[in-house]
Amino acid sequence: MSIEALYIILTGALVAASSALLGSFLVLRKMAMLGDAISHAVLPGIVVAFLLSGQRENLSLLIGAAASGLLATFLIELLHRKARLQEDASIGISFTWLFAIGILLISTYTGQVDLDQECVLYGEIAYVPLDQISLGSWWTGPRPLLISGLLFLVSLGYIIISFKGLKLLSFNQDHARSLGVRTQVWHFSFMAMVSLVTVLAFEIVGAILIVAFLVVPAATAYLWSRSLIPMLILAVVFGVLSSVGGYYLALGLDGSIAGAMVSVAGILMAISVLIIKVLKRT
Amino acid sequence: MSLEKQVVGEVVLEVHNLSASYNRKPVLWDIDFQLTAGQLVGIVGPNGSGKTTLLRNIMGLMEADSGYVRLFGKGLNEVRDRVSYVPQRESVDWDFPVSVREVVEMGRYRPKNLLRRLKTSDQDLVDQALEKVGMLEYAARQIGQLSGGQQQRVFLARALAQDADLYLMDEPFVGVDAATEDAILKVLTELKEDGKTVVIVHHDLQTAFQYFDSMVLLNTRLVAVGPKNSVFTKENLQEAYGGRLTVLSKLSQVIASSEFPVREKGFKEKTGKGDPQDG
Amino acid sequence: MDNWWIYDTSLWLVAGGTMLLSITAALVGGFTFLQKRSLVGDAVAHSILPGVAIAFLISGQKDPLWLMLGALISGWLSLAVMDYLNKHTKLSEDTAIASVLSVFFGVGILLLTYIQKKASGEQSGLEGFLFGQAAAMRLNDLYTYCALALLLISITIVFFKEFKLLSFNPEFAQSLGLPVGILRVLLNSMMVLAIALGIQAVGVVLMAALLITPSAAARNLSNGLKGMLWVSVIVAGFSALVGTLISFSAPSMPTGPWVVVCLSAIALLSLFLAPQKGLVARLMMQKRHQKKITDENLLKAIYHLGEKENSFAAWFHVEEITGIRDFETDVLKSALKRLIRKGLLLRQGHSFQFSRAGLDEARRIVRLHRLWEMYLNKRLRLKADHIHPNAESMEHIISPEIEAQLLEELDYPERDPHQSPIPYKP
């Protein structure tokens, strides 16, 4: 295996693992489509941040994305609660609108934004090895690898610290509130983490496929699991497997690496559904 | 976890002029009653009579249109540790990947210990609760593998682990087998004998009469409250289950579909000056 | 020449075609919206991508019928998979939708990139499937799509009643003996086909908007299903026109985002600003109600004064009125002004007197208040000392029709539970 291949696989695996950890709770809380909405809605924020800062600097990107992610959540709530539009339509309208604005901005400022429609859709995981960074003299490697490594550590830390709270919130929110737990605060911190993963994974796997990374390995693990910690571990394993398998599938077909990773995640899910069905019969 | 000894007869729950609506439709009208300690109380009434809404309002899970609730003479936030709430069994996803023991442990969770491990004393309470409902041997099972009755026992154990003085339960007898029914009743009776108060939303009149000491008979408004014999009169039941309140439901519709406030916020009237309010 | 485009026939043909496709999507999408399946529609739209790619791989060309066939098959497959996951596994509906959406789309992207690298020339148009590219559409293909769209519109018209029942109340439809299963399959197939057609206009990614946003925009501007569908069709047609024209004037611009931005703008405007049902209109209505309540409370207070003094013709000073009931000064001032303007009160300096009409109105309010107290006391069994705040809000809401019913139920009582007389019309 070439070092480039290793970089790509490792980056993909770290993103997949971070997404799987948080996505597990999205699945358990039955909020997968909210994750979908957020991942679309961050686009205009990212583009505006690009335009204003003129570079791929992560902090401004993060702020822009957070702002438009918040705008989306706010808009969904506003449409649903105040304008009394049904929830599914509130989600559908909000994210398509914001995403459309993002695409228009990209098309309008083609020359000035280092982003194109393809990047939005497929991500740029294939270019990971090209974007090198040095940390003093002791490490030189791809910047996205470093970022996804940090992302994984932050996600893991968050899940470990918040484990009890997330479990309580996801299992029975009313019970949590009856204990005096401030569920809104927990909800907000969780959605903030999901947004963080979405933004950082954005340039690696693209806006739409992030949802697959968040939901599919977690859903597959959920099918197999009877308790929470094994589910989280299994979700990470499925995420990593998808990333490795996807790389080689893409290599074989000469196609999009992110698309292939998602395809493998889908195959793993399909196989799981079938095996479980057979096991249940016997 | 009250240190003060419960006195039988002490007022544990007061509901004052409580009105509440669901999706802008008023479902509770001016409910006003109080309950004393050391009894099993049934909240009874036909479907859609606001029983669950009442319980959720007491637990602060919904915002009331007007009125207020006092527990042990105080606001809910001051006495949370003394109150335990058991929602309907169907309100959670029983495929959730947790074990019986983990669910009961959640009864020991508090806002302040969420980031820490549970103490040994907490674990002991969890063991005792599991023991009491006869689920100790199933502690490691995933909750999805239990029968309906066993799931209800797990919920009961979670409430017991909270070690409260007032228990509010929403339909704990729905879909349970005879053995579980007996087990639950036994636990409830023990709680009562310890001077604790259990308030139960229940939809079946016949069993209600067997189970409970006191009754809150509800149908949007409070029909009757008190010892079961005084509540279960023919007139009361007729009123709660008989004819619909046509004017009321028409008005509810107007309120739900228009932009009228359900209550005039901050309404204050000077009394005794020509107004016949105290008449 | 600046207006070259006005004379470009092919532009207008494409624009007209795109409008027809969008209208079809909006029409069929109306039922998707009513069934609360917006997100399912979104998933189907994403899931069509691999079908189109495979159809292209097999046929080797961009024949619209092949592509439609591929789209239909994968769209239907995605519906079936979602249904299966939802019913036969423990995954929730939400997770099933998100999984199918993202996996199908991922496979589609993989295939699309594979085709891009492999084929040459011919493939270029497939990109348009992602965000729509009206300008790149070929007229011959467009005719085929339009024929299919007209077919969908005719089916909708023929089965309008059945679809309406199915969307509003499937149990009732079943009880009427309608073949609910077959109708559902038909409606689902129409949704998939409408999505496949609409994709020509706005692309896969934003297709959900074309399906549901017109209905959301129409909801506040119309009454009844027919009205809603008409308005949504107009909104969709207009937005499609805007999108296409922009796409023609700047060829690098994808059509879809413009259509969607236009649709969303109309929808948001309608949701917030529509007369009667819009958010702003409702807030204003709340304000009007608030004023009405204040006015009526003021009349009631003066009536109480009149009762106390045994004369409704007396002049009352402002301070006497505020002695009965607290009013904020500003609120009181504007309410008094309104009542004088309406001719319900007469004014002399700081004193006020009922006009004839004002006394009648005050009687009506006090009557309703006391009748309602009676009702609370008799029928809701509220104790006399509890009913007052409860009656307080209701007298402003009770309509003449409800009043008549109250009177009948209470048998025209003379006095309220506090023993105050109930004022009937003299």
Image: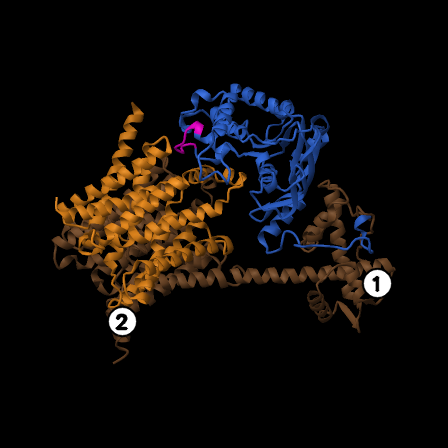
Chain colours: A orange, B blue, C brown
Quadrant containing the N terminus of chain B in the rendered view: top right
Q: Is residue C12 something one can see in this rendering? A: yes
Mark 2: few, some, or many residues within 10 Å (few <14, many ≥20)?
few
Image location (x, y in percent) of residue A201: 29, 51
Image location (x, y in percent) of residue B267: 69, 54
Mark 1 — residue?
A: C312
CB-based contact (under 8 Å), mark 2 and mark 1: no
Q: Chain of mark 2?
A: C
Amino acid type of the residue that numbered disc 2 sits on in the rendered structure: Ser
Check the image and name the residue furthest to the front. A137
Mark 2 — residue?
A: C249
Front residue of C291 and B151:
B151
Tell me if residue B97 is in the magenta stretch: yes
Q: Secondary structure at mark 1?
A: loop
Tell me if residue A73 is in the magenta stretch: no
Amino acid type of the residue that numbered disc 1 sits on in the rendered structure: Phe
Drawn side of residue A270 relative to residue A34, left or right? left
Decide: is C347 above or below C120: below
State how many labels appear.
2
Drawn side of residue C425 relative to residue A143, left or right? right
Residue extent of the magenta highlight:
B94-101
